[in-house]
Image (cartoon, helix red, strand yellow):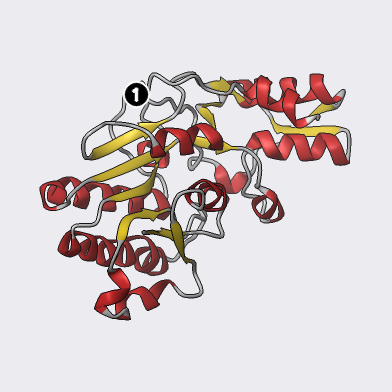
Amino acid sequence: MKVILTGSEGFIGKNLKKVLEKVWEVIEIDKNNCWEVFSWEREQWNDVECIFHMGALSDTTETDPMRVNDMNVKYTLCLFQIAIAKGIPVKYASSASVYGNNMFGSPSPMNFYALSKLTVDYWVEDHMDEFSHIQGFRFFNVYGDGEDDKLKRNQSSPVSKFIDQAKTTGKIKVFESSDDFLRDFICVDDVISIMMDNDKPSGVYDLGTCNPISFQEVAEIVAEEYHAEIEEIPFPAHLVGKYQVYTCSSEDWDHEYTSVKEYVKNSLG
């Protein structure tokens, strides 16, 4: 038996692949071969037990709406229509970015990436009864092992970025007023555990810890463990008005989460 995994070269995809391979044959789909799936022969879909759709154009600063729409909406809906036709369950990555700066849970996307994720979520909600089973996960701020490529692109989580800075320079750089910016940080291992093992019905769910902490607190945790200094830097002009102030999951998964402090302490080993 086999499963399809899109975004297999991404941060979450790589970690998920390691878990899936313990049970199934994993058919990897990445940016180089993603459109080929729509020309597969009928027998290539045989024995597919689930589609894990983690792939996306994830750059929140992308300014070309057509490019974002092609990869994140058009591609996704084509894949989901196949899943409906063939009765294949789906688990897919949405994003907490759909909430923007609305602290009360109503979607208010602030960039094309967030808008694309919300568009898919709305489509799924409108077609939910057509799926054999589907779960969308609005990932909050996921961090953990395997963010090397994201570090190179300056798109990693603050947890991994601060650890890297502490290791390489002994100095952690945080934006001014970072104690005012809070995020719901969740370890990638917890994300995968919940995705793989839950009994919730079809739906679009928040996936975070329900316990946000500030960027400043993350920096202080890393600085304490790595004996590093914290340096404040000016807030980037291009992020003014496009930066989430606060994120917090509304979904309680009854899960024992890894805390940022625990993760940072273990990273020393």
State the residue at coordinates (21%, 46%): 133
On the question of residue 118 being in view, the answer is yes
Residue designated by label 1: 250
Q: Where is residue 233 in the image (x, y as percent from the top left)?
A: 74, 35
Q: Where is residue 20 in the image (x, y as percent from the top left)?
A: 47, 50
On the question of residue 233 being in view, the answer is no
Q: Can you say which quadrant of the picture contains the N terminus?
A: bottom left
Above or below, 212 relative to 39: above
Q: Determine which quarter of the picture holds residue 103.
A: top left
Above or below, 115 relative to 173: below
In the picture, measured across the screen, residue 140 lies left or right of residue 10, that is: left
Q: What element carries label 1?
A: loop
In the picture, measured across the screen, residue 108 lies left or right of residue 213, that is: left
Circle 1 packing at 10 Å, graded few (<14), some (14-19), many (20+), is: some
Q: Where is residue 116 in the image (x, y as percent from the top left)?
A: 34, 54
In the picture, measured across the screen, residue 159 lies left or right of residue 114, that is: right
Q: Where is residue 127 in the image (x, y as percent from the top left)?
A: 14, 51
Of residue 43 and residue 109, the one placed in the foreground of this image is 43
Of residue 19 and residue 246, the one placed in the foreground of this image is 19
Q: Can you say which quadrant of the picture contains the C terminus?
A: top right
* Residue at the far left in the pictured view: 129
Above or below, 26 relative to 264: below
Three-letter amino acid code of the residue under disc 1: Ser
State the residue at coordinates (61%, 45%): 237
State the residue at coordinates (44%, 66%): 64
State the residue at coordinates (41%, 33%): 194
Number of labelled discs?
Answer: 1
Q: Determine which quarter of the picture holds residue 86.
A: bottom left
